[in-house]
Amino acid sequence: MPKLKTKSSAKKRFRFTATGKVISGSACTQHMLRRRSQKMKRNARRTMLLCAQDARIVKSYMPYAR
C-alpha cells in the first residue's frame, strides 16, 4: 500500500503535544478587532487545545503524526 499524504494546510496550522493532543492558534485575530473586547483579544494571543471531535479530524489529515 502506498504512503498516505499529509495535508499541507494542516501541517502548517497544527502541532501535537507529547500526549497526542492537538494545539492550534486561536481564531478571530485578523480583522474587525475594534468590536472585540480587550479580554478576548488578549486570550486569543495564545494557542489553544482542540476539542476531541476536532482533534480526530486533524489527526486524519496528518496520518504520520503522533
Image (spheres, helix red, strand yellow):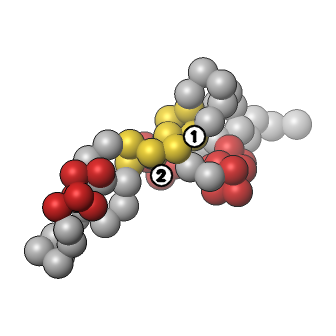
Residue positioned 60% across, 21% down in the render = 18
Instruction: Tell me if 35 is positioned left or right of 50 in this view.
Output: left
Residue positioned 52% across, 44% down in the render = 49
Q: Position of residue 47 (x, y in %)?
A: 38, 42
Secondary element type, mark 2: helix
**From what the image shows, is residue 32 above or below residue 46?**
below
- Mark linked to residue 9: 2
Q: Quadrant of residue 5?
A: top right
**From what the image shows, is residue 1 above or below residue 25?**
above
Residue 31 visible to the viewer: no
42 and 28: which is toward the camera: 42
User: Which amino acid lies under the numbered mark 1 shown in the image of this protein?
Assistant: Val
Q: Quadrant of the C terminus?
A: top right
Residue positioned 50% across, 35% down in the render = 15
User: Which amino acid lies under the numbered mark 2 shown in the image of this protein?
Assistant: Ser
Please, which residue is most extreme toward the right here? 1
Residue positioned 66% across, 30% down in the render = 20
11 and 20: which is toward the camera: 20
How many residues crowd mark 2 within 10 Å: few (<14), some (14–19), many (20+)?
A: few
